Amino acid sequence: MFAQVRTLRLRLVLPLSVRSLAILVVGVVSLSRSRPAMEQVLRDPRAYTALPIAAARALETSRHDAVVSDPVAQKLLAGLGESRLETPASTLDHMTKRALVGDELVQEAYGRGVRQVVILGAGMDARAFRMGLFGTAFFEVDRKELFEVKEPLVADVPLQCESRRIVPGHLGIIDMAAELERVGFDKLKPSVWLLEGLVMYLGRDDMKRLAFEMGQLAAPGSSLWHDAFSETSIRQGMSYYGVAFESGFDDYDELWQSSGFDTAEVLLSEGVVVDRKEKAVRRNLRFQVNEVQLRGRCAMLFVRAWKTS
């Protein structure tokens, strides 16, 4: 089962030399602006993990039966999209499922009138450019190095939202509440929070602090989603492109409820299935689990939570 694999691998074969980068960069991207930042990202394993995730969306978009359409994804590879991908099918399917689950939560909230989306560990996320949610404000939080690569690449891409604001900085170091409010986030209005591919890189104490802070910032009507791994999975040792995962919880439902969210749902990943014909996600609640059921068990998890009051 994919959840039991200790090292997740979606290998984007990237030439690391400046000369190779210069040959491969195409389109209207300014190499002089992008190259120094890209060199830094390629050297930083944590920042590098954003690239294969964008590459997975590019591959999915190219399918005849694509369930996620992201025409910006290849551009976000800074011209490296022409490189070959070595992609286990299970890994690509997982990345596609993650993207679709996040999309559906944002769309569902939009239907209820929610007009703020906060993406933590945003990486090369392109929802502000592809979802057609005009009237919505997007807030992206991630490392300064990633935005130094990303911003020149999307400078000429029209937004499909009301606004997009970036918050450069490391979670756990920046004052996230102050920085979000500085760029226009309104904690009195409901919001959607996406933590796609993020929480496993946070230590336990950092994760608890983040959950508490999000609970303080999320107004009634807010919701969140993230993927995660059980405690046992992390203890056995897991990494992605050489970056070790730092924490997993068996009680994410209790974590979010204790942080101010009324309802939380934790599903085994195999209980979340992509329906390509309907271009939708199907959830089987028979795969919903709690702390007791996860104890001592390796598992990949999909977590959602809502605040109604």
Image: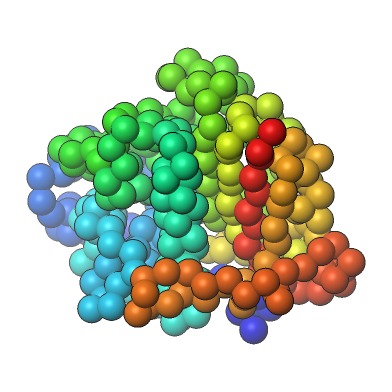
- Location of residue 272 with respect to 38 vertically, above or below: below
Question: Which percent across, then down, holds residue 228?
Answer: 65, 59
- Location of residue 235 with respect to 93 vertically, above or below: above
Question: Which percent across, then down, holds residue 49?
Answer: 47, 56
Compared across the picture, whether 9 is left or right of 41 comes to right
The answer to which of 4 and 270 lies nearer the viewer is 270
Residue at the image point whose x is 76% and y is 74% from the top = 298
Question: Which percent across, then down, holds residue 259?
Answer: 76, 37
- Location of residue 161 with respect to 5 vertically, above or below: above
Compared across the picture, whether 224 is left or right of 233 comes to left
Residue at the image point whose x is 52% and y is 35% from the top = 191
Q: Can residue 84 be seen in the rendering of this structure?
A: no
Q: Can residue 194 be seen in the rendering of this structure?
A: yes
Compared across the picture, whether 176 is left or right of 123 comes to right
Residue at the image point whose x is 46% and y is 75% from the top = 274
- Classify the position of the N terminus by image quarter: bottom right
The answer to which of 37 and 234 lies nearer the viewer is 234
Q: Colour mode? A: rainbow
Compared across the picture, whether 73 is left or right of 204 comes to left
Question: Which percent across, then down, holds residue 4?
Answer: 68, 78
- Classify the position of the C terminus by image quarter: top right
Q: Quadrant of residue 104?
A: bottom left
Q: Quadrant of residue 57?
A: bottom left
Task: Give the number of callouts.
Answer: 0
Residue at the image point whose x is 62% and y is 32% from the top = 220
